[in-house]
Image: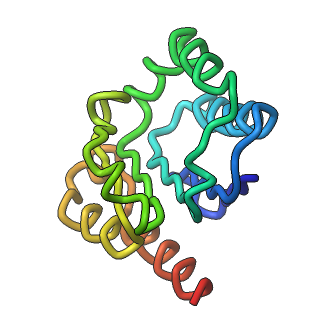
Amino acid sequence: MFSTNQSIEAVLLLEFSGQQSLEDHQLVIAQWDKKLLQEQPFIAIRIYHDAQSLIHSQGIGKLTRAWLKDSAAIKIQHLVSAMINIVPGASYDAMKHMSVEAVFKVPGGIFKDTDDAIAWLQSNVDVCNKHGIAIEHIVQALNARAESEQ
């Protein structure tokens, strides 16, 4: 299951819980496509709430590779200022070596919590500023989201 929050114009915020089905993933790709079609720079934030949300059902990898090859990879490189992936603390050690920059060719990373993601954003302000994205709004939204979960 996933949800999206489009309250900040320059952000694609996707949240995941539970194992993604192929149908769920197709809806996620549709959200990406919708944002990419706007042709405006943005920051992608993907929040995985549990270990199950990191498990991909059969066919998701093939679907994603085809989508990226079709044109999404180039669009992501040109329009995504940064990609933030927040994973559950228990999953972080197994995932921290994965490189957003190597896979998507955009700045970003894998973070164990919202605070680490915010610290990265604040130490990489130039990444956002080069496309005119005010990170203050993103930080406020992430902080408000984190507070609502407590």
- Of all residues, the one furthest to the right in this rendering is 23
Query: What colour scheme governs how the chains and residues are painted in the rendered image of this protein?
Result: rainbow
Would residue 59 appear left or right of 87 to someone viewing this image?
right
Quadrant position of residue 130: top left
Residue 40 vertical position relative to residue 121 in the rendered view, above or below:
above
Residue found at x 71% / y 35%: 25
Residue found at x 56% / y 48%: 54
Q: How many numbered callouts?
A: 0
Residue found at x 42% / y 66%: 90
- Residue 13: where, in percent of width, then height? 58, 55
Residue 30 vertical position relative to residue 9 in the rendered view, above or below:
above
- Residue 150: where, in percent of width, then height? 57, 90
Would residue 65 appear left or right of 3 to someone viewing this image?
left
Residue found at x 31% / y 35%: 106
- Residue 31: where, in percent of width, then height? 69, 39
Residue 54 vertical position relative to residue 134 in the rendered view, above or below:
above
